[in-house]
Image (tube, rainbow, N blue to C red):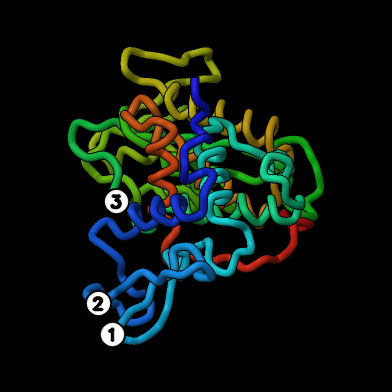
Amino acid sequence: MTSVLNQPYFQNEEAAYAKLESIIWPNGPVCPHCGGVGRIGTMKGAATRPGLKKCYQCRKQFRATVGTVFESSHIKLHMWLQATYLMCSSKKGISSNQMARTLGVTVKTGWFVTHRLREAMRADTLPIMGGPGSIVEIDETFIGNKKGAEVKRGYAHKNAVLTLVERGKGSRSFHVSGTAAANLLPIIKANVASGTHVMTDEAGQYAHLGKFFTEHDFTNHGRGEYVRGVVHTNTVEGFYSVFKRGMKGIYQHCSEKHLHRYVNEFDFRYNNRVRLGVDDARRADNALKGVVGKRLTYRGPASA
């Protein structure tokens, strides 16, 4: 049995550029400088960098990495593709330390690689969720402590995450400043169609959702009720079970500053899961589709 990492584009720079080009330029090369598509040639020669092209409209050279999260990186592209696959195929994530050991780079570089890939996983557009006949489950959870907050009983000192899950489809998560109705309702209303059947637990912040959506049902966890026919929040709680295992078991610590990137990462894998017909290879390809137009500059792993 051959390892998937023996694929040519995981081992060879020329093959890696061909792979990336096929994903971000499905209709042929596009010059990132002038937008030209017609008169572009591949540069040849023993000293020519892999993947180098020239636009004969603006006379500038470029590679597929220009304008992507890979631009100006000293890491070989085939190693970036390895990192993308590892991060997309690891259900609960892969730590920057583990990434660094696997790729043979420094922890500083491993941290930067994982954050750039989280940026690639970020969705550029967020279509409305739900609609007639759809069910969206809504819940919140808490992860880590807010910087400088005094630790007390309850959750006021913890970071809050709101998640919306449409049954049979995908999730959408937000790092929120609090869990009061004033914090959550604007997000829910902006992301869920009014014709949706929404389901929550008995928390008071959700008490008035019925005013904004076709139907609102809830279970009373405080009384030991978790399922009542089709009424439950088990789907979103299942999402949180993976999220928390990843955050506590793999990443162990995440600063408030970067939490939004981590929730996006878990949303991406959930929205590209096997049950929706997306295997590991296709999930990695989908992540690569998101590398264009996104850049992160290094700020130091101490703030991660």
Q: Which residue corresponds to the image point at 40% horizontal and 44% vertical from the top-left?
A: 285
Residue furthest toward the front?
46
Q: How many marks?
A: 3
Q: Can residue 186 be seen in this view?
A: no
Q: How far apart are marks 1 and 2 (CA)?
A: 6 Å
Which residue has dot 1 on it? 57
Indicate the amino acid at tag 3.
Pro
The quadrant where residue 277 appears: top left
Q: How crowded is mark 3: few (under 14 residues within 10 Å), some or many (20 or more)?
A: few
Q: Earlier in the sequence, mark 2 or mark 3?
A: 2
Secondary element type, mark 3:
loop
Q: How crowded is mark 2: few (under 14 residues within 10 Å), some or many (20 or more)?
A: some
Q: Earlier in the sequence, mark 1 or mark 2?
A: 2
Tell me: 112 left or right of 150.
left
Q: Which residue corresponds to the image point at 70% horizontal and 51% vertical from the top-left?
A: 255
Indicate the amino acid at tag 1.
Gln
Residue 8 appears at what percent x and percent y?
A: 47, 42
Secondary element type, mark 1:
loop
Q: Are marks 1 and 2 in contact (CB under 8 Å)?
A: yes
The quadrant where residue 278 appears: top left
Which residue has dot 3 on it? 127
Q: Do the residues labelled 2 and 3 touch (CB within 8 Å)?
A: no
Q: In this view, does 62 lie above or below 21?
A: below
Residue 170 appears at what percent x and percent y?
A: 36, 36
Which residue has dot 2 on it? 39
Secondary element type, mark 2:
loop
Q: Distance between the residues labelled 1 and 3?
A: 37 Å
Tell me: 28 left or right of 278.
left
Q: Is residue 211 visible?
A: yes
Q: In this view, does 84 lie above or below 280?
A: below
Q: Earlier in the sequence, mark 1 or mark 3?
A: 1
Query: Residue 20 got which mark?
Result: none
